[in-house]
Image (cartoon, rainbow, N blue to C red):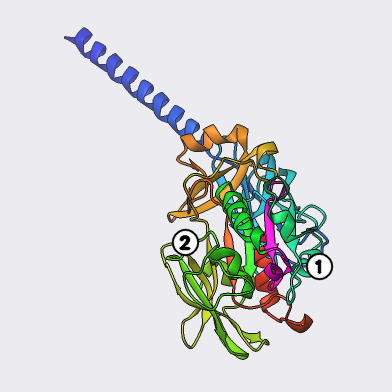
Amino acid sequence: MRKLNLLFLLIFLLTVIYCRSESETAVETVVENTVKTGKISGRVMSQNGNKPIGGASVFTFDDKYKIYHTTSDASGNFTMDAPAGNHTIYIQTGDGSNFRTEISATIKENETLSLNSAQTKLNQVAKIAYVKGSFDKIEDIIQNLGYTATEITNADLADILTIAQYDIIFLNCGSRKYSTNASLYPIIDNNLAIFVANGGSIYASDWDVSYLVGGNDNTNNCALVGGFVPDSKLCSKNTGSSGIVAASVNNTGLSSALGFNTLNIDYDMGAWQKIINYDANYWEVLVKDAGSNDALMLRTNQFTATGLPNTPIGNASNSTFTTVCITLPGNIQISVSVPQIAVPYLVALGATVGSCTGTTNSGYIYYTTFHNHATGNIGNAAVILQYVILNL
């Protein structure tokens, strides 16, 4: 009997020791898997260092491809938790395909690494073109940020091989009338459709809505001949009158990047394109008339069309980066560009290839009813247009 009791006691002691050993091992494992972090801070600036960039995505990954992410405020400032060790810090606007910067950094546990202004300048990856206009000079805003753009003509727009070299095309108000040969319009419209369908982005202001929906200098009716955006998606008429319009910013990301959500827009011409109707499932309203709720600024990346050729656009074919959609805590989705080598790991964690919104291949179309160079001084609207440039 005594031997039996000793046997039970021995079994009990071995069980306690085994369980304690297992428990201690589990605790040690949790400690080993805890990612040690520090912080990084800095200020995102334009390439020439003259303008702070609000709304830029700043992010990095740990060794298991968990993302650490923040956005710069209206003054370009940011602070972000980051995994300790040697990592690449990414700074991007839009989906990162046109403007981005990569920084190699060593983050130390419980310390803050302050990045200097030379490191946090937002670089231009895209090739940008513009068509000269009668009333606008978006190229001045581009150059004031330290970026470069090449002037092209309507004859160039009629050559798909020429425009396929670029990632972004800006259409200044009044530029369509610079085409002396109206027979070019159908060719231009088809080429712009090919350009956007294959990932190129365009910006048009005021009268240049005619590139989108048809017409010559401007549009005085709905459903005109020409253009490439379906008539059911947008109608704009040249019926706006001159004066100051109190406007509101209708997009949270845009207002955060700008640091304001109301502004006065000076419509300084005798007539301007007024948006009569639009498909709300196709277009996102970024700025609207605070009184009438009329849309003043729209964007979409929903363009699709059948029968268009697959054409490599801009730097896409040479890029080692791929756009992916990542879901952050709180079910917030962001579109960013990452090195192709990281894509399988991110997909395994739930990311999807392509932008979080729109069609897989479509570039962006931005349209503003207001000018970008009204008598050389456009106030807060200039900051909006800086955002447009960097987020195409």
Contact check, label 2 and label 1, Cβ < 8 Å:
no
Q: Position of residue 109 (x, y in %)?
A: 66, 45
Pointer 1 residue: 144
Determine the residue positioned at 48% across, 72% down.
235
Determine the residue positioned at 75% across, 75% down.
134
What kind of residue is marked 2?
Answer: Pro
Toward which corner of the image does residue 104 lie, by quadrant? top right
Mark 1: few, some, or many residues within 10 Å (few <14, many ≥20)? some
Q: Position of residue 11 (x, y in %)?
A: 28, 15
Is residue 347 found left or right of 336 in the rendered image? left
Q: Position of residue 36 (x, y in %)?
A: 60, 42
Is residue 211 found left or right of 123 in the rendered image? left
> Disc number at residue 230?
2
Q: Is residue 166 magenta?
A: yes
Q: Which residues are magenta?
A: 163-181
SS class of the residue under badge 1? Answer: helix
**Residue 108 can be seen, yes or no:** no
Q: Position of residue 140 (x, y in %)?
A: 79, 69
Toward which corner of the image does residue 3 lie, by quadrant? top left
Camera-nearest residue between 280 and 191: 191
Look at the picture and state if 113 lies above or below 341: below
Q: Earlier in the sequence, mark 2 or mark 1?
A: 1
What kind of residue is marked 1?
Answer: Asn
Look at the picture and state if 272 lies above or below 234: below
Determine the residue positioned at 76% across, 69% down.
141
Q: Is residue 216 magenta?
A: no
